[in-house]
Amino acid sequence: MAEKLRVDAVELENFMKLLDGSVTSLKGLRSALADATVGGLGTEDLDKACEDFQSDWKYGAEQIGEQTEDLGKIIEQNKNAFMEVEDALTKAMKKAGKTKDDIVVVPT
């Protein structure tokens, strides 16, 4: 099973950057939405519907932004923990005298 575990630190870093960009984009959206007015679009019912939608969307966008930030933090913590374990294993294998001819190959 261990041979199936693969972690690509570069891909994790790219994913974290993508999440960070998404958070920035959502913050911009929320800012633009906060400045938008809904009055005078049409009938009173349409104005009310637009106001309700704006309120719901603002809340939803805030929640998505917060959860995206949290996900980014969790991914970074996991990546850092994995790298610590990988470094410790590498040092342990080198100390144990494992070579490329042994079963375990330590990446350099």
Image (cartoon, helix red, strand yellow):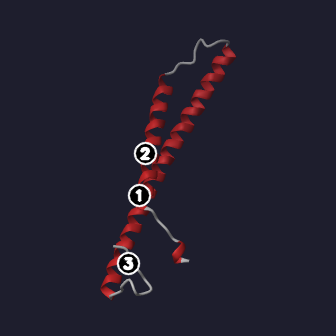
Taking the spot 32% from the left edge, 82% from the top edge, the residue there is 94
Q: Residue furthest front?
A: 101
Taking the spot 58% from the left edge, 27% from the top edge, the residue there is 54
Dividing the picture into quadrants, the one containing residue 104 is bottom left
- Please tell me which residue lies in front, 79 or 66: 79
| Residue that label 2 marks | 20
Amino acid on which disc 2 is placed: Asp
44, above or below 32, in the image = above
Q: Circles 2 and 3: CB distance less than 8 Å?
A: no
| Residue that label 3 marks | 106
Q: CA distance from mark 2 to mark 3?
A: 33 Å
Secondary structure under the numbered disc 1 in the rendered image: helix
Which mark lies nearer to you, 1 or 2?
A: 1
Amino acid on which disc 1 is placed: Val
Q: Circles 3 and 1: CB distance less than 8 Å?
A: no
Q: Earlier in the sequence, mark 3 or mark 1?
A: 1
11, above or below 20, in the image = below
Q: Residues within 10 Å of mark 3 (few under 14, many from 20)?
A: some
Q: CA distance from mark 3 to mark 1?
A: 19 Å
Q: Earlier in the sequence, mark 1 or mark 2?
A: 1
